[in-house]
Amino acid sequence: MTTAAPYPFLKGHGTENDFVLLPDVDGTVHGALAADRVRALCDRRAGIGGDGVLRVIRTAAIEDGRGQDAEWFMDYRNSDGSLSEMCGNGIRVFGRYLAREGLVDPSGPLPIATRAGVKTLTFADGAVDGEITVDMGTPKVLEETEVAVVGDGVERSWPAVHVDMGNPHAVAFLREGEELADVGPLLDPPVHDEDVYPDGVNVEFVVRRSRAHVAMRVHERGSGETRSCGTGACAVMVAAALADGADRGTPYLIDLPGGTLTITWTADDRVLMSGPAVLVAEGTTSL
Ligand SMILES: N[C@@H](CCC[C@H](N)C(=O)O)C(=O)O
């Protein structure tokens, strides 16, 4: 069942990767949450505007949550209406909302179910408004591939590392002397190998800043170029740490257009991502 009556929403962001949140705790407000409704909500002129939608729903109320040991499920959609397995910035905003509403206790670990499995959040100082660290799980480093961008009729390509963070990424390090702006306007998805990425891919372009410190831009599958991508920053950190031969446990700073995330790959093969999560508005809409 889908309602046409006004329903509640919130707006939030993590390092300026912005989302429309839809509280729908028992799954009775939005039914299947149609792709055209997601597109309408994310429209930056005719809608609320966002890189994606986070539906807040109990795990027991959604088929994709089946078998996962967590009370809450992050039902994430890209702004084009497509589903993704995981959203690293979104899950911090999701946790912030649950804590602010008193639906969870921020003083202990908070497991949240996603299409990429359960991720556990920790709030700094156990505070509702503390910085949030997410255990993003174990990365999968796969084959080397290639991405390309076409600008002014010229195609430029870079080798890229395929990293799976529950969702697919291609991490391309720019060459010596190239800057992020040189990649050009990223209006279209970068060219990629469709056999390697049959469901599309998030593509990160990376430059070195200093030891354990890089900067990146991202073109997200289903959302276009965004100002930040949490799973993308984790994929970049993993690829950079491997290229650097860095010791496990070395924290990396990842600069994105919308802010900085701190990411650590631990000795027990888990990627920990820390960053802000902000709620900026709330209201009702019948979009
Ligand atoms: N912005 C997100 C990733 C959102 C999903 C991605 N576009 C995909 O389709 O896999 C993040 O912060 O991780």
Image (cartoon, rainbow, N blue to C red):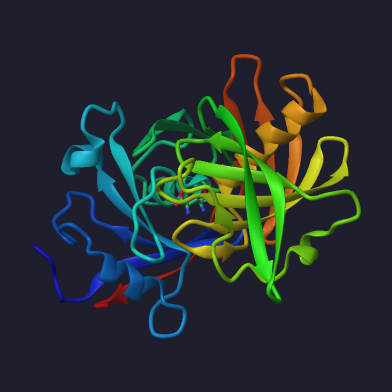
Q: Quadrant of the C terminus?
A: bottom left
Q: How many numbered circles does the render carry?
A: 0
> Can you give x and y, in whole percent of width and height, for residue 28 in the image?
13, 56
For image coordinates 59% across by 59% down, the residue present is 190
- The image shows residue 52, relative to residue 86, as above or below, that is below
Q: Is residue 88 left or right of residue 198?
A: right
For image coordinates 58% across by 71% down, the residue present is 187
> Can you give x and y, in whole percent of width and height, for residue 255 in the image?
74, 51
- The image shows residue 267, relative to residue 59, as above or below, that is above
For image coordinates 38% across by 80% down, the residue present is 47
Instruction: Name the outermost residue toward the bottom.
Output: 46
Viewer-nearest residue: 239 or 32: 239
Viewer-nearest residue: 249 or 127: 249
Viewer-nearest residue: 23 or 100: 23
Whether residue 123 is visible, yes or no, is no
> Can you give x and y, in whole percent of width and height, for residue 271 in the image?
59, 29
- The image shows residue 99, relative to residue 53, as above or below, that is above
Q: Is residue 269 left or right of residue 121?
A: right
Q: Quadrant of the N terminus?
A: bottom left
> Can you give x and y, in whole percent of width and height, for residue 248 in the image?
72, 19
Whether residue 10 is visible, yes or no, is yes
| Residue 55: quarter of image | bottom left
- The image shows residue 60, relative to residue 225, as above or below, that is above
For image coordinates 34% across by 67% down, the residue present is 9
Q: Is residue 260 left or right of residue 10?
A: right
